[in-house]
Amino acid sequence: MNNKEIIDLDSKYIMQTYGRQPIALTHGNGATIWDADGNEYLDFFAGIAVNVLGQSHPKVIEAIQKQAEKLIHVSNVYYTEEQVKLAKKLAEITIFDRIFFANSGAEANEGAIKLARKFTGKGEIIATNNSFHGRTLVTVTATGQDKYKEPFKPLPSGFIHVPFGDSKAIANAITDDTAAVLIEAIQGEGGIVVPPKMYLKEVEAICREKGVLFILDEVQTGFGRTGEMFAYELFGIKPDIMTIAKALGNGYPIGGLLARSEVAEGFDYGDHGSTFGGNPLGCAVALTVIETIKDENLLENSKNLGNYLKNEFINLNEKYDFITDVRGFGLFLAIELDRDSSEITNKMRERGFLINSTAGNVLRFAPPLIITKEEIDKMILALDQVFSEI
Ligand SMILES: *Cc1c(COP(=O)(O)O)cnc(C)c1O
């Protein structure tokens, strides 16, 4: 099938909830992806910051093949070696002791909210404006953007929103019924919004002082995206609960919520569960993803090439008046414009580069962490040309 045939079937058989780019992707290798008409693209979006190892990584293929020959799924009625190995690895590479495995970011946040309420015996969750935490009814309610939740009222109660970046607003919003503060380290869908330097440290201190749990949503920032394995390292903080998903499985759907032992013990037998969560195939892949990030020095690549790319963006910022900001860490970068950004995303796609528009006027860049300097140079050249035509 070609692009048009696939898109026609989508418009007939799929619920029309997505504003998709008008191409159907067929296969890829590293940071290169092809569409159903045979066009080639360099991928600077990685399936929404998911494919840290790019497409067709030999280690990922091998992990899937080997595990598929043994066990794909058994449910959580039984133990598997793959699940405990991944849990142990996550405990080793983080400040947390225990994990609950889910299948997606929304489910990870849903579980974190349940754990916070169970552990504290309190109901209220404080989240921030412009945030994104998922599309289930609870996580869309936690999300600080009205457009995602207005049509779905009545919404679950117990959620309060305050401006992002304002720690005093959090201190003021905390009441005797506050269970937790839920924050993204860097707001991803919101436009790669980086908080003031001390914000997360201040939030941590406020949470400690008032006996409130600090839940950090690292669904988009986790696994090397920002140049550190996790963004909490970047900001020097120790949240009580952290949620992960996107990059963990490099495309295999797996997520989870991590906590220190004393908080994790808030969940008793029967309190939470998932049929697919932490199945052996997902865990085998995720373990390989984490090991490969380390083996291939991808944190270094994210840091170094991230700095390189950001500097190139800063040069573009000096050249073009319509650029209003350049921000981000590692290979998680944004160019903010004084206008809608979708036209530029379209023009870049026509030239063979996949980038993303978010928050209306922001260009979001989240390439696979295996991206090379040569690939970045090609993209910058095209972006400069597209910008020069505006
Ligand atoms: C993508 C995202 C989610 C939701 O993840 P899904 O896997 O789509 O449910 C939650 N939080 C953040 C910060 C995200 O970027």
Image (spheres, helix red, strand yellow):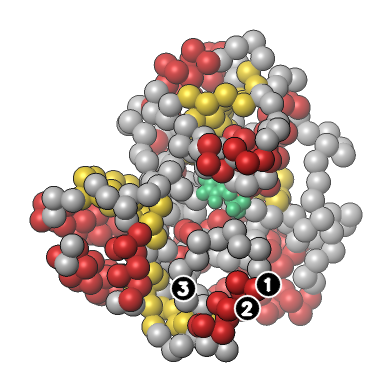
5 up-or-down from 317: above or below: below
Q: Is residue 201 visible?
A: no
Disc 2 designates what residue?
A: 9
Disc 2, SS = helix
Q: Looking at numbered disc 2 in the image, what kind of residue is underneath it?
A: Leu
Disc 3 designates what residue?
A: 22
- How crowded pointer 3 is (Cα within 10 Å; few <14, some 14-19, many 20+) is rated as few
Q: Name which residue lies at 46% across and 37% down.
A: 130
Residue found farthest to the top:
176
Ligand 1: does it lie within 8 Å of the C-beta at label 2?
Answer: no
Q: Looking at numbered disc 1 in the image, what kind of residue is underneath it?
A: Tyr
Q: State how far apart marks 1 and 3 are (Cα).
A: 16 Å
**To which quarter of the image does residue 224 belong?**
bottom left
Q: Are marks 1 and 2 in contact (CB under 8 Å)?
A: yes
Q: Decide if residue 68 is on the left or right side of residue 296.
A: right
Q: Name which residue lies at 59% across and 58% down.
A: 17
61 up-or-down from 105: above or below: below
Q: Name which residue lies at 72% across and 74% down.
A: 67
